Image (cartoon, grey):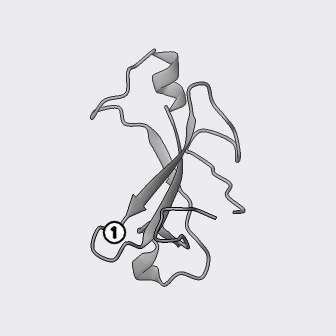
């Protein structure tokens, strides 16, 4: 996938305590097409130092993975994934 991240305040590829690599599986209920959304998230260094619980005032930092070659209007969307009608993923 060639996914690398750099969140504000961290060096590239750093994995802070409590961070997560999130993979969301989506399916369009009308077309049956399947999509995958991938992002890395973590608390800011300041929030970690203050033991701040993530909330709307202190959201997690996030960087999404985007598949190279997708048109600009698709970059904010999940990435299409081939799969059979039975739900099998490659």
Locate residue 3, reporting x and y percent. 67, 58
Q: Residue furthest top?
A: 51
Locate residue 13, reporting x and y percent. 71, 45
Q: Residue furthest front?
A: 86
Mark 1 Cα within 10 Å, few/some/many (few <14, many 20+)?
few
Viewport quadrant of the C terminus:
bottom right
Locate residue 24, reporting x and y percent. 46, 52
Locate residue 35, reporting x and y percent. 46, 66
Viewport quadrant of the N terminus:
bottom right
User: Looking at the image, which is closer to me, 69 or 82?
Assistant: 82
Q: Residue 73's image quarter? A: bottom left
* Residue at screen point 40% across, 19% down: 52
In the picture, measured across the screen, residue 51 lies left or right of residue 81, that is left
Q: Which residue is mark 1?
A: 28
In the picture, measured across the screen, residue 84 lies left or right of residue 58, that is right
User: Looking at the image, which is closer to me, 70 or 53?
Assistant: 70
Label 1 sits on a secondary structure element that is: loop
Q: Residue 66's image quarter? A: bottom right
Q: Compared with residue 59, is residue 26 higher up or lower down, i.e. above or below? A: below
* Residue at screen point 48% across, 84% down: 71
């Amino acid at each position: 996938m060639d996914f690398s991240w750099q969140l504000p305040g961290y060096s590239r590829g750093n994995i802070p305590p409590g961070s997560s690599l999130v993979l969301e599986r989506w399916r369009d209920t009308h077309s049956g097409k399947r999509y995958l959304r991938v992002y890395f998230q973590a608390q800011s260094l300041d929030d970690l130092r203050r033991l701040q619980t993530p909330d709307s005032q202190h959201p997690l930092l996030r960087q999404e993975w985007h598949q190279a070659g997708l048109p600009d209007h698709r970059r904010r969307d999940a990435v299409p994934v081939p799969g059979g009608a039975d739900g099998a993923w490659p």
